[in-house]
Each structure stands twice: as C-alpha cells, then as structure tokens.
Amino acid sequence: MIKKIIILGSTGSIGQSTLDVIKNNKKFRVLVLTSNNNIKILYKQAVRYRVKNVIIENYNNYIKYKDLFKKKKINLHLGISFLKKIVKKKVDYCINSISGISGLEPTIQSIPLTKNILIANKESIITGWPIIKKKLNQHKTNFIPIDSEHFSIFQLIKNENNKNLSRIILTASGGPFLNQNIKKSDDIKIKDVIKHPNWRMGKKISVDSATMMNKVFEFIEAKKIFNLKNDQISILIHPTSFIHAIVFFKGEIIKMLAHNTKMTVPIAYALDAYRKNIKKIYIQNDLKKLNNIKLINPDFVKFPLLNLIKTIPEKDSYFETILVTLNDELVKNYLNSNIKYFYIEKYLLKLIKSPFFKKYYKLKPKNIFDIKNMVNITKKYLNLKLSKYD
C-alpha cells in the first residue's frame, strides 16, 4: 500500500533529510510540500518527487514563481490554509520541520489531516503543547518526535510504565566552543559560531547550539512530551553526539540509544523506512564510538543560559512563549550584526527576570491567538529595551 506524506518546511535540513529517506522508495508518495523563501529548491523537489501541490507563505514569491510551477503542471498555493482544501482524506504521515514559532499554526492545521504527525519543530511543542495534545486526542492522530534526543527517549520508554522512570539524560555536543577559552570581551564572528563540530544545521539553530539554548529548549520539550518533572531531567555533554539519550529506571536499569549524527536515522525509523542491512564497516565504526563514550557535566559559567533551567515553571504558562521569542529575536539581531554574541546571553538572562514579564508566568495561553499576541508583546518590549541598552 502506498503511504502518502505531507512535508511542511521541505527545503530545510529536516525536510531534505526526509526526502532522502524516501528517495527511490515506491512505497511513499509525497502529496504536498511547503516552504517560505527557498523556492528554487522547492521547485526542484516538486519536479523530482512528482508533487502536484506545493504551498508557500511569501506573497511576492507566489506571484514571481506561479507561472514556473504551472509549466510543470504543479499547483502553487499561497498560505498554509490551503492544506485542508488539498487533503481530502487523512494522509499517513505529516512531517513538520518548520523552524520557529511560525511552525505552531501549521502543526495545528495539519493534525486533523494525518494519521501520524512527526514533529522536529521545538518551538511548537514548547509554546503550544497543551493545544497540540488536545488536537491530537480530538483527531486520534499519533505523535512521533523526530528531534534526535526526543526520538531516542520515545524509543527507550515506549513500552515502559512512566512510573518506573527515574531520570532522563539529554546529551549535548557542547557546540563549537566546548574546548575553546572564549572571553566575554571577544567579538565572536558568525562564521565561528555556526561551525558546529558534528551537525550541519541552519544559522539560527547553530547559534542556539553554541549558546546551549537549544538544550534548554530540549529540556522543556522533554518535560512536556513525556510528562516529566523538572528534577527528572538532566543534561550531560557528550562531544561525539553518538549517544542521544540515556534513561534511568527504578530497579537500577539504564538504557541508552546511540546512532550517527544523520537526521535520516530517526526519520527513517519513524517512517518505518530504515535500512534493513547494515554493512560491516558501519558496525566497526560504531563499536569504536561506543568504546570512546565521554560524558561531562556542563559548565554553567561557560554556558550561562543553562541557568534558565532553574527558572522553568512546573506548570504551563506564557513563560515558554516569552523565552522562545526573546531568544529568537536576540539571535536574529546577532545574525544581522546589531548586537554582539555575548549580548544574546546578557540580555536574555536580564529580560526573562523582568517584572514586566513575571506577571505572565502565572497565566496560561488558551489558544494559538493568545500565543501570537504574547509573541507580539514580547517583541515590542524587547525592541524598546534594545533601543535603550548600550
């Protein structure tokens, strides 16, 4: 039976990895691809995988490229709202690899249209998990995380009783500056920040990896997905990124999951499209990695954003939306050369404790519109403060 797939954010690294997994696999058919700005890549993907419907969010690109797609008899649609008009019957899989909070609305809109949703969009889960969970239950849609750490936890505990979980360890590479003595006075160049030792990623997530903000997000993500308390989750540095998660169970049993740094591994397993035969050379290389496991406690002085973990409320609130928005905007300012690298940490740690925001930490968003409103409030307040800071 042919399995139908929707890929949201197909031109990003996760989207491209998904297409690599199903390449030349006749069991899969891509029904819809979406993107925002990478239209040339989107066009090549649509032609290569014979996709009849593509969606973009940028109006200018829609006008500019509409005729190009039409020549290949590909329907170009403007806006994610067209998804429900294209998909008449539930597809087998929807992969959401859209980055940022902008991925939340497509997540909500796609859940009723798919039997299984595979999410790599941290921000959707962090800011809107209660809304997502309600939607999943309402439409009987299965949820599978494909972020490597959460996919690993998912695999390790899926046949276990949650009451038997003692502690979950998220591993972190430590990013490009793990073994470097960078000083607060240094003007850290963007090309050095995005030079990740193990992964090929976009600029935004590469910055988050360097500051280890990415691991703070993964902490919150794990807490929500697996219904954990803050004190049940820890972070350890694992420079080779071979072990992706470690789970301690009551009764002194420890499980861990290892795989190479290619995102095709969790995606392939989630789609049940993994390679069944592994060459001997890969087994030998993996054994070498297993014999060189190195786990280190993170340095909270070197990576001060990890201190944010201590401030995460146990209950859902606007805290998550404010945290994600502040970080997104500060990283954007850094990548646009408006602020220096260390000011991401300085301003974020200062602003998250602001009395202006603290009053929202006891309130909970009821819907996606509440979250969007808080994003706008946070951006406005941040821009006001940035104009006053040195």
Image (spheres, rainbow, N blue to C red):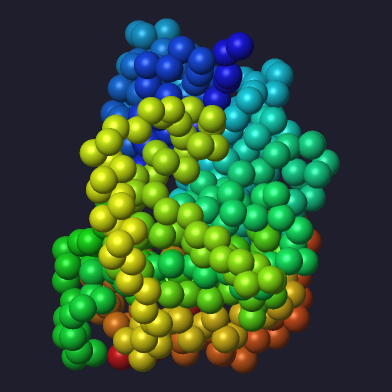
- When asked about the image quadrant of residue 229, the answer is bottom right
Against 79, residue 299 (above or below) is below
- When asked about the image quadrant of residue 106, the answer is top right
Quadrant location, the N terminus: top right
Relative image position of residue 259 (x, y in whole percent)? 39, 49
Question: In the image, 101: left or right of 20?
Answer: right
Relative image position of residue 148 (x, y in whole percent)? 46, 52
Relative image position of residue 85 (x, y in whole percent)? 66, 22
Question: Which residue is painted at 65% across and 55% down in the image?
Answer: 157
In this view, which residue lies farthest toward the right? 138
Which residue is more in the foreground, 266 or 53? 266
Quadrant location, the C terminus: bottom left
Question: Which residue is painted at 76% across and 58% down in the image?
Answer: 161
Question: Which residue is painted at 58% across and 33% down in the image?
Answer: 94
Against 163, residue 37 (above or below) is above
The answer to whether residue 56 is seen in the rendering is no
Relative image position of residue 338 (x, y in whole percent)? 27, 73
Against 79, residue 328 (above or below) is below
Question: Which residue is painted at 53% across and 41% down in the image?
Answer: 96
Which residue is more in the foreground, 110 or 120? 120
Question: In the image, 355: left or right of 131?
Answer: left
Which residue is more in the foreground, 300 or 291? 291
The answer to whether residue 82 is seen in the rendering is yes
